[in-house]
Amino acid sequence: MDNTQYLLLFISGLIAGIINVVSGGGSSLTLPALKFSGLDAATSNGTNRIGVLLQTLSALYIFRNRKDIDWGLSLKLAALTVPGAILGAFFSLKLGDKEFQYILGAIIVSIIVMLLTPVKTSDGSRRITELNPFRVILMLLLGIYGGFIQVGIGFLIMLFLSKSMKMDLVEINIHKVMIVFVYTIPASIVFYINGFIDIWPGLILSAGTVIGAWFSARISLKKGERFVRGILLVSLVLVSLKLFGIL
């Protein structure tokens, strides 16, 4: 890897860290950056988890003193994704490079459709905390998807928490960070023990994601939902441009 590739990894990580904390889609920037640096699809997928893990840890450190968040519920939601994340990671490893590319293409098309569909979030007035069988299954499926490829998981978690549990956007984002942090730990272990994590590019990428996540989490606490909605709009535009090959 040369200095240009290192710089690309850092900058893509920085942008991803900013938008992942308050919305999602950062991996649509970091995965192509890792592939550009010379990694194959599976190793890019695994190496990307280092940045995801550290950026969510950084954001949780900032969010830790929030008294209005049900951290017990957050941990329950996160725990439900763990079995699925392990299954998803193992499934990803069994795919060939071409198969992985075909599935990634299908996922990108799905994300484009999702991005073009307006998503309205709840104001939190009818917030639901009950974890019925339907919600448990959905969390398991989210874990499988997150362990498998990660791209777009933030949008899917936001959609679930908004539509199924009627949470407001600020609370959704904090729960989302906890969920992704928890399931990324076992998923990363699966990739690492099978030799699909390249530490050095992952650390360069992580330096950017941690700085971006720290900045984004600090500002979102001060600015609240108005800021989150603004960043969400910007991130949706950026991811759309990336998926359409314009950015």
Image (cartoon, helix red, strand yellow):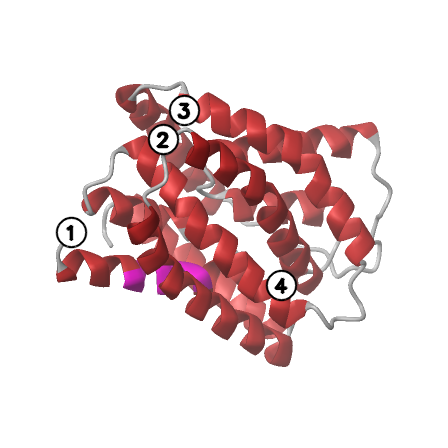
Residue nearest the viewer, comparing 120 with 80: 80
* Relative height, residue 34 to residue 237 (above, below): above
How far apart, in angstroms, are the residues tagged by discs 2 and 4? 29 Å
Mark sitting on residue 104: 2
* Relative height, residue 243 to residue 223 (above, below): above
How far apart, in angstroms, are the residues tagged by discs 3 and 4? 29 Å
Chief SS of the magenta region: helix
Identify the residue under disc 4.
Answer: 60
Residue type beneath disc 2:
Leu
* Relative height, residue 4 to residue 106 (above, below): below
Mark sitting on residue 93: 3
For marks 1 and 4, give the one nearer the viewer: 1
Residue 108: x, y in percent? 38, 36
Q: Are marks 1 and 2 in contact (CB under 8 Å)?
A: no
Q: Secondary structure at mark 1?
A: loop
Residue 43: x, y in percent? 32, 36
Q: Secondary structure at mark 2?
A: helix
Q: Which of disc 4 and disc 3 is earlier in sequence?
A: 4
Queried whether the magenta region covers residue 109, the answer comes back as no
How far apart, in angstroms, are the residues tagged by discs 3 and 2? 14 Å
Residue type beneath disc 4:
Leu
**Residue at 27% over, 57% down:** 9
Q: Which of disc 3 and disc 1 is earlier in sequence?
A: 1
